[in-house]
Image (cartoon, grey):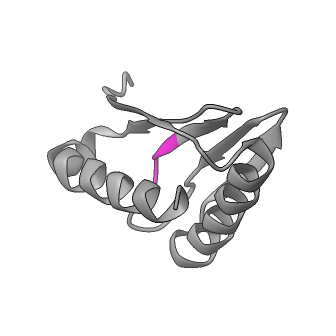
Amino acid sequence: MLQVMANISIRRPNALGKAMARQKTESLALSMEAKLGIRWHWKGDQLTFDTPRGAARGTSGTVSVDDSSVRVEIDLPLVLRGFRGAVEGKIHDELDRLLR
């Protein structure tokens, strides 16, 4: 079965430096693991995640961290496509907190 995905792509400037942004990104991933059941791992400077169960099941993506930016890419499954605006707003809010 073909699954249609809605892509979300957000890039933000990173004034914290790579090490601090990675640390904060990992803290956020741990929180999302507890709340939403995401699975995640680092591959270089890219955190990759997926959600095998729960309300966000089927959602996957990456958070890439470098010295000057943080980039979030999320694929939403068809069932969550109608919530894209709300998800994108939540990501912007989390990035505001993350990059302080």
Residue 5: where, in percent of width, then height? Answer: 34, 29
Query: Horizontal placement of 53 versus 39: left or right?
Result: left
Q: Is residue 57 magenta?
A: yes
Q: Is residue 34 above or below residue 13?
A: below
Residue drawn at x 59%, y 44% as measured from the top left: 15
Query: Is 36 contained in the magenta span?
Result: no
**63 or 65: nearer the viewer:** 65
At which x and y percent is residue 67? 70, 33
Question: Which span of residues is magenta-colored?
Answer: 56-60
Nearest to the observer: residue 17 or residue 32: 17
In the image, what residue occupies the spot 34% across and 61% down?
A: 93
In the image, taking residue 91 as reference, residue 97 lies left or right, namely right
Q: Main secondary structure of the magenta part?
A: loop
Q: In the figure, is residue 70 to the left or right of 22?
A: left
Q: Closer to the camera, 64 or 31?
A: 64
Q: Residue drawn 69% across and 68% down?
A: 27
Q: Nearer the viewer, residue 86 or 51?
A: 86
